[in-house]
Every structure is written in structure tokens, then in C-alpha cells.
Amino acid sequence: MSLGVAVLESPRRSGALITAARALEQGRDVFAMPGNVDARSCEGSNSLLREGAIAILSGEDIADEYAELFPEIIRPNANMTISDGKNSARFTEKHRDGTNNFPGSANKHIDNKSHVAYIDIDKLLNELVGDERIVAEAIGSSAKQVDDIIISTGLKAQQVQTALTMLEIKRCAVRIGGLWKLSNIK
């Protein structure tokens, strides 16, 4: 169903490593993101890199890996503008060396405001509902690990992950390393 599997963070014994092993058995690519060498939560993904997994730092690295196979899907337009109504971003194809003769990484020019005002945590919480509000309240003004958020909210892991994803999409939360914090909080 896929061309490859990406392992972003994995301890030495985990389902992610089992999935990576099955992908290799099926001739699929295995990608891994390097992690902190002292962190147990990264031992598995780091061992995949030692064993020959393709190193990635972002999703774009995966797209670049398949750009030549599927240029009409991955890079359909050499120059593309994306807008959300308020802000817009223009992408121009350029090779990493700055030339235009490779359908690889994009040079991104953003036309949005350079200064973003800080948000008030009380105002943010009043605008959120459901699990997103519960998770935001649990994070509060300090950075927290997902496990701590799950314990303090009493929500299921899937509910917390979904809420964190939605908060990130809304630019209300940001992940820094293994910690989540509300963004732009005074």
C-alpha cells in the first residue's frame, strides 16, 4: 500500500521496528529520523540508521526521494502559490545548489507578516472546545510530554494525539523535541 515506511522515534523494542522489518521484507524503503543518542525513545530509529535506513529530517526529504518517480504528483508545478485567505506562500523549484535543473527541494518565499502578536492563554482557551480545550488547559504555560498530558487529562492517547494535531494545525500548540507547549503565550 505504500512505497516506504518512516520511523520518526522508536525505542529498541517497538511496533514501529516490527513495521519497518515487514516493509523491508516486502522490498519497501525504510526512512528514519535521527534522534538524541542518549534517549531510549530513539534507540530503535537510530539503529535503523546504522543498518542503512534512509535518513530524513522532514517530510520533504521523503518527497524528494520519490520526485523523479512521480514528478507529476510530487512536483506538478515548478512555481506554485498556496494561500489560506490571509497569508500566501510562493514555491519555486530549485536544486539544493540553487539551480533550477532538478525537481528536488523547493525554495519557499513567504508573504505573511513578519511579526505575530502573542496570544492570551485565557482568550485561547475560551475559543477552544472539547478535547482541544482540555488538552490546552493541561499544557498550560509550561511545556509537557504527551504522556503527562494523557495522565492529567484522563483522555485516551488517541484523543490527546488528535487534539494536539488540531492545536498544531490551528497554530495554538507547537512540538519542541518531545515536549508540547502552547505557542505564542506571554
Image (spheres, grey):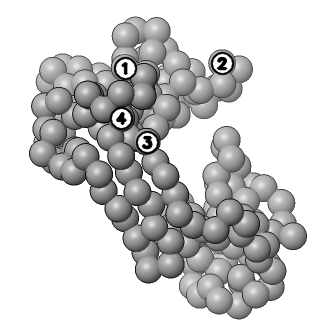
Q: Which mark is residue 37?
A: 2
**Residue underneath mark 4:** 94
**Residue underneath mark 1:** 54
- Residue shown at 36% from the left, 46% from the top: 92
Residue 95 screen position, x and y as percent: 36, 28
User: Which residue extends farthest right?
Assistant: 186
- Decide: few, some or many residues near mark 2? Use Cα within 10 Å; few <14, some 14-19, many ≥20: few
Q: CA distance from mark 4 to mark 1?
A: 22 Å
Residue 113 screen position, x and y as percent: 64, 68
Q: Is residue 15 left or right of residue 33?
A: left
50 is higher (above) or lower (below) than 176: above
Q: Quadrant of the C terminus?
A: bottom right
Q: Quadrant of residue 3?
A: top left
Tell me the amino acid under the disc marked 3. Answer: Asn
136 is higher (above) or lower (below) than 14: below
- For numbered disc 4, what is the local secondary structure? loop
Tell me the amino acid under the disc marked 1. Answer: Ile
Residue 48 screen position, x and y as percent: 43, 17
The number of callouts visible is 4
Residue 9 screen position, x and y as percent: 52, 34
Q: CA distance from mark 2 to mark 3?
A: 31 Å
- For numbered disc 3, what is the local secondary structure? strand
Instruction: Say whether disc 2 or disc 3 marks the residue closer to the N-terminus.
Output: 2
